Image (tube, rainbow, N blue to C red):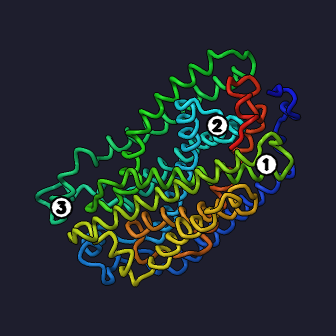
Amino acid sequence: MASAHAIPSLDEEFEFTAESKRRIMISLGVGVVLVAIGAYLLASGAGSHETHVAAHGAGGHEAHEGAHHAYKWTNRLWANVWLNAIYFTGASVIGMFFLSYNYLAQAGWSVAFKRIPEAMPAFLPFTGIAVLLVFFIAGHDLFHWTHPGLYDKASPEFDPIINGKKGFLNTPFYLIRVVLYFVLWYGLWRVLRNFSLQEDLYGGTDYYEKSIKFGTAFLLVFGVTSSTSAWDFVMSIDTHWFSTMFGWYTLASWHVTGLAIITLTVVTLREQGYLKWINESHLHDLGKFMFAFTIFWTYVWFAQFMLIYYANLPEETIYYRERFSGYGGIYKAPFLVNLLLCFVFPFLILMTRDAKRTHIILKLAAWCIIVGHYFDFYNNIMPGTVGEHAGFGPIEFGMILIFASGFVWSLYSQLAKANLIPKNHPMLEETLHHDI
């Protein structure tokens, strides 16, 4: 077997150039301008700035939910912040998830690009701050369960169903859980990141063995918090509705999005002249991961939908009726686009062996998944927060640019802080000669 040192450019550092920073700052600036324009248009078109949410053929649930609070134009602004914060929280934490299950499996193939998923969770503090800010500023407007009258039996707003959930859905416990999510996820990532950097300096297997232990600890934590965070961040918006599969559903969506981001970053860096040691077998495995978990997400999506459709219980079917025919049908197009981009296109694009080894096809599939799962979260969050007042305008595109720019800046900054390949990793020889 050839020595690892026979492979060129193992001492390769990513340069976060001034030109790259300038482009990201321009993108961020464009996003801010678009959000400002969108906010101005919404404010000027809002009339009295308060209109009651109307139910358009989606049943009494909408009328019931909307009867307790008025719609304000700022709801759409804060709903977009929440949507992007949750989406990019998932994209970030999946980097840690990917690292952890590869450590537990003692996998060697992924070591060649492990710095990429290793860099992704650095964005978690920013999304965590965004989540807390939105809840403090607009929690009463976006989350129906925060209204105190729902729990007062003497109040005309009293809701026995929501009152039955108050042991879990109450503001103090909710905030404790949210803080715990981000502290545990980010804290465990910092431990693994430090072990990885120390391994680069000192070598040996001690840091690798410690990484396996802490990676396993993260998997145990994430096994619980991935579901409870999905309930808190998304499912609690539609307070009456519930699904026992929703935690798996959200994890599947986050996971395949993170895999697409990892793949897109690997391909992009290769095209820029980095990661010369990555071969077609690495790309093939990344393509297989995207292909497999696209199918897994579709399986969970269909299983959840099929069971609710078959049971035909009003408290469950209302969730899909709102998205099919509610609010004048404005969510039907995003709903269908979601299915096309999240399953149909990636499934067809990645079917062949050669497709999984071709840059342009991997990029196309990755972008389909990334955009498609944004629509997935859009359909899960917007109906319950803004109802008939949703849409796609400057505020939506601007908010995407702001968060995406921040995420890319964070990712590139972390990549620039360490060698692009962990030179002292015990699995280095295996990853450099990966062949399937």
Task: Return the residue nearer the eye: 292 or 336.
Answer: 292
- Say which residue label 1 marks: 269
Q: Do the residues labelled 2 and 3 touch (CB within 8 Å)?
A: no
**Amino acid at circle 3:** Asp
Mark 1 neighbour density, 10 Å: few (under 14) some (14–19) many (20 or more) = some
- Looking at the picture, how far across and down is residue 431, in whole percent? 71, 34
C-alpha separation, residue under disc 2 versus residue under disc 1: 15 Å
Of residues 149 and 433, the one nearer the viewer is 433
Name the element at disc 1. Answer: helix
Q: Name the residue under label 2.
A: 118
What is the x, y in percent for residue 384? 37, 67
Q: Are marks 2 and 1 in contact (CB under 8 Å)?
A: no
Q: Is mark 3 on a helix, strand or loop?
A: loop
Work out whether mark 2 precedes mark 1 in sequence or the reverse, and give the earlier one: 2
- Give the camera-side residue of 166 and 94: 94
Q: How far apart are marks 2 and 3 (CA)?
A: 45 Å
Residue type, label 2: Glu
The quadrant in which the N terminus is found is top right
Q: Which amino acid does label 1 sit on?
A: Leu
What residue lies at 22% left-to-right and 44% top-to-bottom? 167
Q: Distance between the residues labelled 3 and 1?
A: 54 Å
Q: Based on the displayed image, in which of its 4 quarters is residue 223 positioned?
A: top left
Q: Residue at x 75, y 19 (%)?
A: 201
Few, some or many C-alpha atoms within 10 Å of disc 3 (few <14, some 14-19, many ≥20)?
some
Query: Which one is closest to the eye, mark 3 or mark 1?
Result: 1
Query: Residue at the spot x=59%, y=64% of the render?
Result: 346
* Mark 2 or 3, closer to the camera: 2
Q: How many marks?
A: 3
